[in-house]
Amino acid sequence: MWSIKNMDLEDTLLMMPGPVSVAPRVLRAMSKPMINHRSAEFAGIYTDCRGILADVFQTKNDIFLLSGSGTAGMEAAVGSVAGSGEKVIAIENGKFGERFKDLAALYAELVPLEFEWGLPVDLEKVKEKLEEGAKAITLVHNETSAGIMNPAAEIGKLAKKYDALFIMDGVTSLGGDEVKVDEWGVDIAIVGSQKCFAAPPGMAAVSVSEKAFEAMNCMKKRLYYNDLKAYKKSGDKPRPETPYTPAIPLFYALQEALHIVKEEGMEARIKRHRTLSEAVRAAAGALNIEMFPQLNEYSQYSNTITALKSPAGIDGEDIKNDMKKRGVIIAGGQERLKSKIFRIGNMGNVTARDVLSTIQQLEIVLHKHGYIDSVGAGTEAATRVIDRL
Amino acid sequence: MWSIKNMDLEDTLLMMPGPVSVAPRVLRAMSKPMINHRSAEFAGIYTDCRGILADVFQTKNDIFLLSGSGTAGMEAAVGSVAGSGEKVIAIENGKFGERFKDLAALYAELVPLEFEWGLPVDLEKVKEKLEEGAKAITLVHNETSAGIMNPAAEIGKLAKKYDALFIMDGVTSLGGDEVKVDEWGVDIAIVGSQKCFAAPPGMAAVSVSEKAFEAMNCMKKRLYYNDLKAYKKSGDKPRPETPYTPAIPLFYALQEALHIVKEEGMEARIKRHRTLSEAVRAAAGALNIEMFPQLNEYSQYSNTITALKSPAGIDGEDIKNDMKKRGVIIAGGQERLKSKIFRIGNMGNVTARDVLSTIQQLEIVLHKHGYIDSVGAGTEAATRVIDRL
C-alpha cells in the first residue's frame, strides 16, 4: 500500500541495528509462489540454509530455523534446557542480557549477574557464580543496546570447566563478525535473520549441541511453538521440515541472503564489518564524540554497531530524528539509555559509501546544532580507515 | 534460488488447506524496503490491518498480529488465560482439536472431550463437561483435517451460560466463511495468514475479549514470545507496535491481502467459498466418492475444504501424488487419516476455473485408475452449482 507519503522509504539509508537494508535480489526471492511446506522443494531450501549457516556458525551442531524473531530463538534456548526450575546464570550488561534474565526468571531459577548497561563483564564474578553450580549460563555476545562485544570464548571456557550449558545470543554478531560455536563451546547459539545476514526480519536460526539435546531430553516439556525438541524431530526426517507451518517467503529470502554471504565469503565479510565500524569510531573520535561502552581487557567495541554518547547539550533522540529527516535511519538509546546515546549500525551488506554518507549527514547535523565549527573531519578520519579495505 | 527443476512451481495450482496461492500484487508488496518497526510507518500498517480484521471477525475486541503460525496463536490463547493449572475443556474431532488438547495439557488441567476424527461434536457431552466447571473451552471451528464445520455459535452460548472462556480456532474459517466473534461470544479467536486471507504463511491474528484480558491479568506469566499481555501493552501505545521484531514483509503482504478481501467484500467472499465447496461436493457425489465427515444436526461440511474418502482400492496418497504430477497440489490425510482420505481446499482467492480444473484432473486420475468409465460427470455436476454464482 504505497502512497506519496511513504515512497521516500525507498530512498532511505537504513543504518539501524536491524532490520537492515535487504538486497533487491533477496526481496525478489520473496515473490516466488507458495509451496507445500511438507514437500521435497521446501526440504531442499531448508537443507541449503542449514548447510550455509553451519559454515558461518563454524559448527557441526544441528541447526534449526524458527519462524519467529531472535527473541523466539532465545526463548527456545532457555525454555528447552531449563524448563524444570534449574539454576540459570544470566549475564546482563544491556537490554538483551536483561531479556535473557527475564526468560531465565520465567523458565528457571534465575541467578542474575548484572553489570550496568555498557559496562564490561567481570570474568571473576562469572567464575564465582559458576562455582556455585548452574545448569546453564547465558550471554549476549554482541550487546546491541550498548555497542559492546562480550568475551564469549572466555565464558565458553569457564562454562565448560564448571559443566554448565553455554547459551549465547549471537543475534547481531553471527554473519558479520567472527563466531566459533564449536571452538568456543557454545551449546546453543541464536541468530536473527534481519541483522548481519541482511534478510528480512521474522526468522531465527538456533544451533544445538549434543550436550544441550541430552539436557532437553531429561526436561519436562515447557514450550510448544518454540520447542527445540519438536524442531529436532521434524528436522531429522529424511525430508526435513519444521514442526509448524513455516513463513515460506522468509525462507526464500534467507536462502538468497545466505547465498550472498557465501559469495562474499565470511573472511571478507568479517573484515568489511570490522573496518566499517572502526571507520565510524574514527569519525566519532575526530568529531569529539565519546564511545558509550567502557571496556576491560576481555571486551571490545562491537564490530557491527557503534554506540555513541550524545554530545553535551544535544539529546540523542534529536540526532536520530534530524538524521531521519535527512534520509538516514540510525537508532537512539533504548529504555534507560534513551536520549543519552545514539547508535549507528553497520550490519549486513553495508558499503563504505553507506558509512561515509551517514558520517557526512551526522557532521551536517552536528554543525547545525553548533557542536562542530566545520564539516569534514569525520569523513577524513573514516576515509583513512576505509582506505585499508 | 530458481532452477529448471522447480520453475514449474509457478504453473502449479495450489488447492491445499494452506499455504494457498498468493496474488501477484500481494507477492509484490513484499518487495518494499525494510522499515523501522518502531516507526509511524509500521504503526500505520499495523493499524490498517487491525481495522480490516475487526470487520472480518465482526468484533469490537482488540486484535493482535503475531509473527508466527496459527499454532503460535493457539499457544498464545491457551497459555495466556490458563497458565496456572486451571481446567480447560479441549474438544477434539480432528488433528487441530488434538493440538488444543496438547496445549491445554501443557498449560492447564486438561479436560479432554474426544470424538473420533471426522465425527460430529455432541453438544450434550459439551454441556456435561461445562457443568463440572472449567476456566475455558477450546474448539476448532473449521476442522481442516476432517473437513467438518463445528457448531461454534452453540458452543459459545453454552460457554457463556457456564461462565467459561470460549477459545476458538478460526484458522481456516475466518476470511472465507461466516464468523461472528462478538455475537457468538468468542473470547479468543485465532486465524492464520495463509488460509482464507490468501497471504503468505507466518502470521497469526488473535482477537481478545475484555473477559479474556481480565483472566490474563490474574494469571502467572507463562509465555514470552507469544504472551498476549505483552501484545496488549505494545498494541495500546499511541503508536502501536509489537513487543518483538515483527516479520515486516509478511505485514506488507497481509495488508495487501486484506485490501483484496475488503475490495471483494465479505458477503461475496463467503458466497464464493460456500458455492465452490458445494461444487466440489457435487462433483464428488457424481463421481461416486463419499464425503469423509459424518454430520449431526449441529455440524456441517466445511465450506473451505472438502475431505473425501479414498475410493475403494485406491490409496489417497496415490491420488494426491498423481494430481501433483498433473500440476494440482491437493492434500492427503494427516496421521491416522493418511491414505484413507484426500482433501481439496478452496480457501482464499480460488476461482471457479481453479475448482473446475481440479475436478477435471481428478476425473482423469480416477479414470486412469479404472474407478470411473468416462470423464465429465464431475465437471457437469460442479458446473450446475457454480452457475448459481
Image (cartoon, coloured by chain):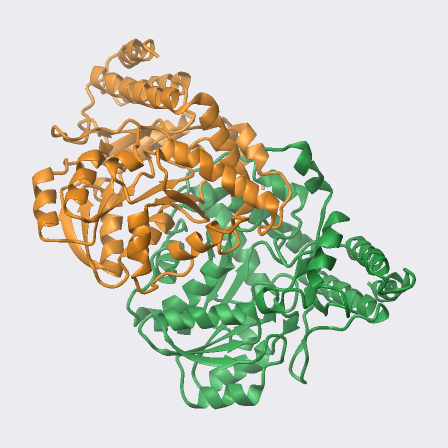
Chain colours: A orange, B green
Task: Kindly identify the residue that appears in the image at 51 percent across and 77 percent down.
Answer: B91
Q: Nearer the viewer, residue A122 or B41?
A: A122
Quarter-wise, where is residue A174 in the image? top left
Position of residue B36 in the picture relative to residue A311 (left or right): right
Q: Position of residue A160 (x, y in %)?
A: 19, 43
Q: Nearer the viewer, residue A195 or B366?
A: B366
Q: Position of residue A16 (x, y in %)?
A: 36, 32
Q: Nearer the viewer, residue B190 or A266?
A: A266
Q: In the rendered image, which quarter contains the N terminus of chain A?
A: top right
Q: State how many labels appear.
A: 0
Quarter-wise, where is residue A170 in the image? top left
Does residue B343 appear in the picture of this structure? no
Q: Height in image: A246 above or below A360?
A: below
Task: Kindly identify the residue that appears in the image at 40 percent across and 73 percent down.
Answer: B105
Q: Position of residue B56 (x, y in %)?
A: 59, 62
Q: In the rendered image, which quarter contains the C terminus of chain A?
A: top left
Position of residue B376 in the picture relative to residue B223 (left or right): right
Quarter-wise, where is residue B310 in the image? bottom right
Position of residue A235 in the picture relative to residue B28 (left or right): left
Q: Height in image: A75 above or below B291?
A: above
Q: Position of residue A118 (x, y in %)?
A: 18, 36
